Image (cartoon, coloured by chain):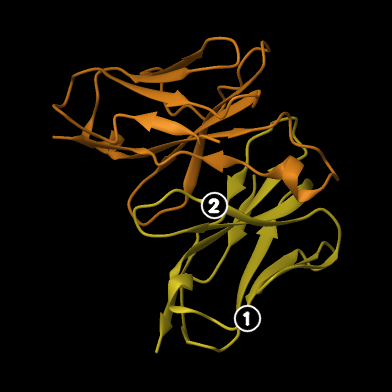
Chain colours: A yellow, B orange
Amino acid sequence: GQSLEQPSEVTAVEGAIVQINCTYQTSGFYGLSWYQQHDGGAPTFLSYNALDGLEETGRFSSFLSRSDSYGYLLLQELQMKDSASYFCAVREKTGANNLFFGTGTRLTVIP
Amino acid sequence: GAGVSQSPSNKVTEKGKDVELRCDPISGHTALYWYRQRLGQGLEFLIYFQGNSAPDKSGLPSDRFSAERTGESVSTLTIQRTQQEDSAVYLCASSLSRMETGGPSSYNEQFFGPGTRLTVL
C-alpha cells in the first residue's frame, strides 16, 4: 500500500513564507507532484519533482528527498489568493498511470 | 484553447436511481482519468483510459460503477443504483499521454475539469 501524509491545516500571514510538508510511504514512484485547489474549484497543477532537489516556479518552489521519503511545497510572498487546499501526489511504479493524492493541506492566509 | 469540461455541474438524484456523468477532455489528450472527492477529502482514483488500451479500472469502488470512452474523446461515468455514500464531486482529468517517468513538468501535468457535484438523497 501507499500513504501520503500532509498537515491538515496551516495558517500564515500575508507576505510571509510557508512550507507545506508531504511525507510518504510507497514501494517506488516516478515523481512528486503538487496541486492547488480553491474551494469549489478544480485542482490545478503547480509543480513536479522527478529528481531530488528544489524546483522553482515563481513564488512557488517544491522539494523532494527520496532518501528521506519527504517533500515540501514552499510558497513565498504569500497573497490572500493563495488561500486554498494543496495536495501532493505520486504516480507509483506499479504500472498504473493514475496519481495517488495526499490528504491535502488547507492553507489560510490572513492579513 | 478549451479546457476539460464536465456535465452536469450539479446532479441531485434519489437513492436507487442511475446517473451518467460526462467528461470532454482537452483535444489531443490521449489519457483520461476519473477521480472522486468527498467533502473535505483528497482525490480518490476511479478509472484511467489511455488511447485504445484496456482501461485501468482498479479504483472503481463497486460493480455499480462503470465508465466508457469513445476513442480519445468523450467519456461517461455511470453509477447504477446510487447510494447516499456516492455523494461527492466527480472530477475528470486529461493529460497529453502516458505520463513520463523523468520528463519535464509539462508531461506530468493532469488538467482537471470543474467536476460534477453529485448529491444522492
Q: Is residue B26 left or right of residue B63?
A: right
The residue pinned by badge 1 equals A76
Residue A24 in picture, x, y percent from top left: 67, 59
Q: Residue farthest to the front?
A: B1
Residues at discs 2 and 1 in contact (Cβ within 8 Å): no
Q: Quadrant of residue B5?
A: top left
Residue drawn at x 48%, y 46% is B43
Where, quadrant-wise, is the C terminus of chain A in this rendering?
A: bottom left
Q: Which residue is mark 2?
A: A44
Q: Quadrant of residue A91?
A: top right
Residue B57, how many percent across, how many down?
A: 55, 22
| Residue under the point 52% across and 71% down | A7
Quarter containing the N terminus of chain A: top right
Real-space CA distance between mark 2 and mark 1, rounded to the nearest whole angstrom: 18 Å
Q: Amino acid at mark 1?
A: Gln
The disc labelled 2 sits on which kind of residue? Thr
Near-viewer residue (B75 or B84): B75
